[in-house]
Structure formats: structure tokens, C-alpha cells
Image (spheres, rainbow, N blue to C red):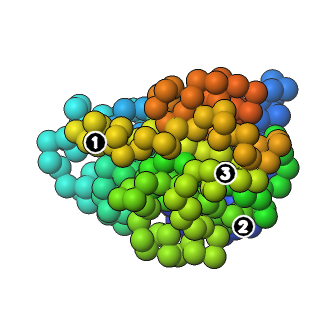
């Protein structure tokens, strides 16, 4: 297969994404049944983390171990990347040794530059602009709980951030309707929103956004790298907490999701995230299964 990268959800066709989610559900069942499946024996994944992570690191590392391969954790503190070695040079060197590279960084352009110079698949494990791996898990979780997501209504409540951008791409690729409720000044990127205009729209008021929604999603108000804006953001996002009252306006069997880590009492009320409509623990677990399907797609 020609070299493929996974920098955004738009790097795959809608059919490929649909097949990938189906495969993630199969791989989950295989693992639950105790089946050993090691298609990546002797293969390695380099994992470059310039930001913190719990779920992404553990899910990719576990995925490689379960597939019979190995993952190498690289932080800028201990590599020459942190001392100014060019991205282009790092990409050429790493990709001569490992079989795929996963990167979590700030600027999306840095990831694109790495991919341009890499001779092996590059996976976006979160940038300031996108978090596509999380969407694989979210869509898998919705389908497992409620069936097809096509034609459903999803409400995004909060910041027009990297997760919101990937939700806009997911709305296009999986063909659902996305209502984005964000305070003015925290809208998603205008170009990304415009590319998804057939599926996504801004609905300022969270109450309007969640009416009849099948899925309500939120994320932190202050993303990694924005810590200096925390006070200002906490003020701007007042009224954007996902509360039990808000969830009452949704369709009766609506789900709640959050990529985590969560801040109870800020973007979500504890009664929602810890309540019966919350699918967050399945969502977190599905990072493992969805990424196994992704690694298989890119590396086998
Ligand atoms: N949701 C997510 O990506 O979590 P981590 O930051 O813990 O990897
Ligand atoms: N928007 C969050 C997602 C964390 C998984 C951040 O970028 O910090």
C-alpha cells in the first residue's frame, strides 16, 4: 500500500473510516475472547509527546504490545528534538528505524512537516488544531450504544477547539448534524467550519444546541498550552456547563461524552459525567480498540 498518514479524519475516505470502526469493534471482541492476534511482531511505533497524556500514551503503547510489537516513548526533554534538531532531520532519521510515528504536539504545521519528511506512516495524537484519534473512539462508542450515527444530531458545548474541529470533520465523514454552542470569541476556526457547513452550524445557546440531540459532547475550557488564559476562559464559559437540566432537553436516549481529562463543576456537572447517560469510560477504553484498527490499517 502507498504510504498513508493520519493527520486528520479527512486523510481517509468515509468508507475507509466506516470499515475502520467496524474493525475496531471486531478487535475489541477478539481481545475480550482472549484471542492472541499479533500482526505487528517485531515492528515499532515511535511516540513523540510534547504535551502530557494518559489515555493516548497508554492506549497506543498497549495496542503495540497486544499486537506483538513495541512502542518507544520519546519526550522532547530527552531527545534532540527538544534541543532544536530540525523536524525534517528528526523525521528522516526516526522513520529509517521505526515502522510508524505517533506525534502529540502544539502546531499542526509541525506535524505536517514531520509527515512530509517521514518514510513511514505518521499519526496525529493531538495538535492545537485536531484530535482525530479521539473521534475514532467517540464514533465507535456511539455506534456500540446506539447504532448508526448517520443522520443523528450531536451537540458540541464549549470551546471551538481541537476536539470541536475534529467533530466538524467527523460530521462530514460520518454524515451527522453538529450543533456547536460556544461563547463569542471562542468559535471554531472559520475555514474548518466553512468546510463543514453542510453538516455543522454555530448555535450560541447550549439549550438550542442540545434540543433533540442524540449525543452531547464537551471538553475542557482551557486546553494544554492555554494555561495562562484560565481565569479569563472560566469567566467567558459561564453558562456552558453541561448540567442535568441541559441533558433533559435532549432526545430521551441521548449519550454524554467527554474526551477526558474532565473538570467536574466547570465544563460538566458531576451528576452528568457520573450519571446514567455518560459513556465516558467506554469512550476512553475505545481509544485502545480504535487505534488498534488504525495501526492495522496503516502498518499491516
Ligand atoms: N483524551 C485524551 O487524549 O487524553 P490524554 O490527554 O490523557 O491522552
Ligand atoms: N482540548 C484538550 C484535549 C485533551 C485531550 C487539549 O488540547 O488539552
Q: From the viewer's side, name the closer residue of 263 and 252.
A: 252
Question: Neighbour class for label 2 at 10 Å: few (<14), some, many (≥20)?
Answer: some
Question: Neighbour class for label 1 at 10 Å: few (<14), some, many (≥20)?
Answer: few
Which image quadrant is residue 286 in?
top right
Which callout, 2 or 1, points at the residue further toward the start of the chain?
2
Which image quadrant is residue 74 in?
top left
Name the front one of labels 2 and 3: 3
Percent position of residue 21, x then y: 73, 51
- Which label was assigned to residue 175? 2
Q: From the viewer's side, name the closer residue of 4 and 183.
A: 183
Q: Residue furthest left?
A: 83
Q: From the viewer's side, name the closer residue of 78 and 240.
A: 240
Percent position of residue 288, x then y: 63, 35
Percent position of residue 130, x then y: 46, 55
Q: CA distance from mark 2 to mark 1?
A: 35 Å
Residue shown at 50%/70% (left/top)? 193
Q: Tags 3 and 1 in contact by the CB under 8 Å rule?
A: no
- Report the residue marked by disc 3: 210
Residue shown at 49%/48% (left/top)? 158
Query: Would the CB of label 1 be found within 8 Å of ligand 2?
Result: no
In the displayed structure, would residue 130 be above or below residue 270?
below
Work out whether residue 23 can be spotted.
no
Residue shown at 83%/55% (left/top)? 148
Question: Neighbour class for label 3 at 10 Å: few (<14), some, many (≥20)?
Answer: many
Amino acid at each position: 500500500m502507498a504510504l498513508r498518514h493520519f493527520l486528520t479524519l479527512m486523510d481517509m475516505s468515509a468508507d475507509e473510516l466506516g470499515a475502520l470502526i467496524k474493525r475496531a469493534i471486531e478487535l475489541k471482541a477478539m481481545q475480550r475472547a482472549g484471542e492472541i492476534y499479533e500482526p505487528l511482531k517485531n515492528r515499532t511505533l515511535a511516540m513523540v509527546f510534547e504535551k502530557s497524556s494518559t489515555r493516548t500514551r497508554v492506549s497506543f503503547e498497549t495496542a503495540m504490545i497486544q499486537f506483538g510489537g513495541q512502542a518507544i516513548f520519546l519526550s522532547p526533554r530527552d531527545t534532540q528534538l527538544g534541543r532544536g534538531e530540525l523536524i525534517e532531520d528528526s523525521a528522516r532519521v526516526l522513520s529509517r528505524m521505526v515502522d510508524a510515528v505517533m506525534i502529540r504536539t502544539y502546531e499542526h504545521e509541525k506535524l505536517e512537516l514531520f509527515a512530509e519528511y517521514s518514510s513511514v506512516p505518521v499519526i496525529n495524537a493531538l495538535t492545537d488544531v485536531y484530535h482525530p484519534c479521539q473521534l475514532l473512539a467517540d464514533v465507535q462508542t456511539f455506534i456500540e450504544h446506539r447504532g448508526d450515527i448517520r443522520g443523528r444530531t450531536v451537540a458540541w458545548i464549549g470551546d471551538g477547539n481541537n476536539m470541536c474541529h475534529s467533530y466538524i470533520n467527523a460530521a462530514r465523514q460520518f454524515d451527522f448534524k453538529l450543533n456547536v454552542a460556544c461563547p463569542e470569541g471562542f468559535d471554531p476556526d472559520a475555514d474548518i467550519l466553512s468546510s463543514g457547513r453542510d453538516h455543522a452550524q454555530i448555535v450560541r445557546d447550549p439549550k438550542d444546541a442540545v434540543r433533540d440531540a442524540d449525543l452531547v459532547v464537551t471538553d475542557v475550557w482551557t486546553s494544554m498550552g492555554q494555561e495562562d488564559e484560565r481565569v479569563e476562559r472560566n469567566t467567558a464559559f459561564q453558562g456552558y456547563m453541561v448540567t442535568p437540566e441541559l441533558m433533559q432537553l435532549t432526545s430521551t436516549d441521548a449519550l454524554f461524552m467527554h474526551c477526558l481529562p474532565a473538570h467536574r463543576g466547570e465544563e460538566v456537572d458531576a451528576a452528568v459525567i457520573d450519571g446514567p447517560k455518560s459513556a465516558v469510560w467506554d469512550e476512553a477504553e475505545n481509544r485502545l480498540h480504535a487505534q488498534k484498527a488504525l495501526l492495522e490499517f496503516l502498518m499491516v
